[in-house]
Image (cartoon, rainbow, N blue to C red):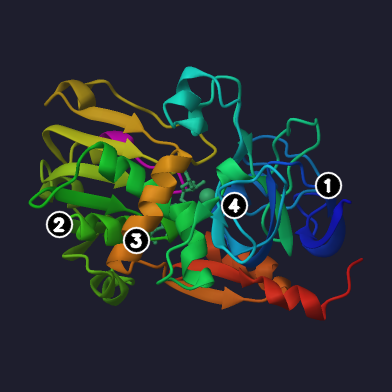
Amino acid sequence: MPIPAKVLQKTSPDSPFQVATISRRDPRPDDVVIEIRAAGICHSDIHTIRNEWGPAHFPLTVGHEIAGVVTAVGEDVTRWSVGDRVGVGCLVNSCGTCAECEADQEQNCLNGAVGTYNSEDVDGTITQGGYAQNIVVNEKFVCKLPDTLDFDVAAPLLCAGITTYSPLATWDIKPGDKVAIVGLGGLGHMGVKIAKARGADVTVLSRSLKKADAAAALGADRILATTEEGFFKKHRGEFDFILNTVSATLDVNAYLGLLKPRGVMVVVGLPPENQELGFYALIIGRKVLTGSNIGGIKETQEMLDFCGEHGLGAEIEKIGVMDVDAAYERVIAGDVQFRFVIDTSTFDDIAAE
Ligand code: NAP
Ligand code: ZN
């Protein structure tokens, strides 16, 4: 039987969120049903639902930082049992047979991975995300939450955590490395925590020093304001590695100048506009500029285990389902330390349209 779910839905980029009831699919033999306890708000949700990455499929429910409890399992499910504490991130399916899927890189599935929302599912329907009471997901796209982390601080790890963990692990960031994290938002603050846990010397590059106390509390060794006069000249050639998490256009060439020779800048922030790159900035000093997209399911589990071991939950502000429109405005204004998380139990108090 299809499963009813109250969700937060938008019918167009400009309409407010409203509570509606949708039907989750009748669980297949390899599906699990998850009661969602907490759902993080990622800037990608905002880009998507405001059509900043192209026209979205409306009506739409976003949300890909999902933490909850398994409430039912299909007859072929082997990995999960009712009562398990689990998470779901940005992916809910992939072909499972291409070279990328076989290499545990489902995010690069050559036949097109299925995103948690706004994506065409294998049955032709459009996937609906985690600002919801429940979700039905193929068991392979479910991860185990660490016992040491509550649902609300664990939820953001499913996107902000893996998106920062994966490049830091791929480029083998280690003690002594001078790492800069650009943008202290949802992704950036997890980047600081994870880079510190790997032993790096971590500098936050923020627009101002407003977040100085918070940066220190996260463990950052220092914070610098990029708007300070002469900043790019003063700090030229200082870093081995830069992780750019900014949701808006940046002067990429100027940031490449902050790298030491052979330094690496990984871009994860995805603003809607194209950026201008001058090859000079790469050629002088043989710099590396690359990107990174979340991570595969195996690495997501590895990240969750790492965060559990090191006690790395997200720093959050918890909100009810009726507060999400206001929260979006605050994310855009850079006014959240550092992730809004929706307490999905607040759906219980609201009648669906
Ligand atoms: P967020 O919480 O809004 O943080 C973005 C940060 O960027 C802000 O806190 C701010 O840091 C900085 N910033 C914002 N506007 C700026 C501007 N005009 N100039 C300079 N800096 C600015 O967003 P998020 O959830 O961390 O997501 C960040 C980006 O990553 C988004 O574009 C999102 O779509 C993308 N993303 C990519 C992946 C992936 O797999 N590659 C996964 C998730 C998200 P300061 O206040 O410190 O300056
Ligand atoms: Zn995200």
Gap in Å between the C-alphas at discs 3 and 2? 14 Å
Circle nearer the N terminus (3, 2)? 2
Mark 1 lies on residue:
26
> Is 228 within the magenta?
no
Gap in Å between the C-alphas at discs 2 and 1? 46 Å
Circle nearer the N terminus (1, 4)? 1
Proximity of marks 1 and 4: CB atoms separated by less than 8 Å: no
Proximity of marks 3 and 1: CB atoms separated by less than 8 Å: no
Say what amino acid the circle numbered 1 marks. Answer: Asp
Q: Which dot, 3 or 1, sits closer to the camera?
A: 1
In what quadrant of the picture does the C terminus appear? Answer: bottom right
Mark 3 lies on residue:
307
Q: Residue at x 24, y 44 (%)?
A: 242
Q: Could you tell whether 125 is left or right of 119 in the image?
A: right
Confirm whether residue 138 shows in the render. yes
Gap in Å between the C-alphas at discs 1 and 4? 21 Å
Mark 2 lies on residue:
199
Neighbor class of circle 1 (other Cα within 10 Å; few <14, some 14-19, many 20+) is: some
Say what amino acid the circle numbered 3 marks. Answer: Cys
Q: Which dot, 1 or 4, sits closer to the camera?
A: 1
Q: Quadrant of residue 216?
A: bottom left
Gap in Å between the C-alphas at discs 3 and 1? 33 Å
Gap in Å between the C-alphas at discs 3 and 4? 18 Å
Magenta segment? 246-254
Give the secondary structure at mark 3. Answer: helix
